Amino acid sequence: MKKIYFLVLFLSMNSFALPFIESFIITNDGSKIYIIPNSFRIDNKEKTVFYKLPNSNVDNKIKFKDFDYVQIGANKFKTYRINNSKE
């Protein structure tokens, strides 16, 4: 009986960790930053992305030019230039 309780506890702990594993930012140098999925915010005027880390409540920001892409669950956010424009 104790084994069943341990198994249920282990599975429930893993299910709470999954949202952070699925949400991350890949920077231009290849490093991965895990983020809280519902904290992701885009500011198109300043060309920045705001996010929160899983162990912090502080808003962090990163410029469009400083990351390759952002993965939020099944959604992927990637910036690119059209015909070598500056926009």
Image (cartoon, rainbow, N blue to C red):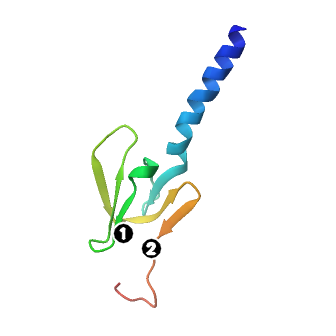
Q: Quadrant of the C terminus?
A: bottom left
What is the quadrant of residue 16 in the picture?
Answer: top right
Residue marked by disc 1:
64
On the image, the x and y values in percent for residue 85 come to: 38, 89
Marks 1 and 2 in Cβ contact (< 8 Å): yes
Q: Residue at x 36, y 53 (%)?
A: 51
Q: Is residue 77 above or below residue 71?
A: below
On the image, the x and y values in percent for residue 40 come to: 40, 56
CA neighbours of label 1 inside 10 A, class few (<14), some (14 to 19), many (20+): some
Residue type indicated by callout 2: Thr
Residue marked by disc 2:
79
Residue type indicated by callout 1: Phe
Q: Of residues 66 and 60, which is closer to you in this image?
A: 60
Q: Residue at x 43, y 51 (%)?
A: 38
What is the quadrant of residue 29 in the picture?
Answer: bottom left
Is residue 36 left or right of 59 when viewed as pictured? right
Residue 46 numbered mark, or none: none
Q: Of residues 8 and 22, which is closer to you in this image?
A: 8
Is residue 9 left or right of 42 when viewed as pictured? right
On the image, the x and y values in percent for residue 13 come to: 56, 28
Whether residue 33 is visible to the viewer of this picture, yes or no, is no
Q: Quadrant of the N terminus?
A: top right
Mark 1 to mark 2: distance in Å?
7 Å
Q: Secondary structure at mark 2?
A: loop
Q: Is residue 40 above or below residue 7?
A: below
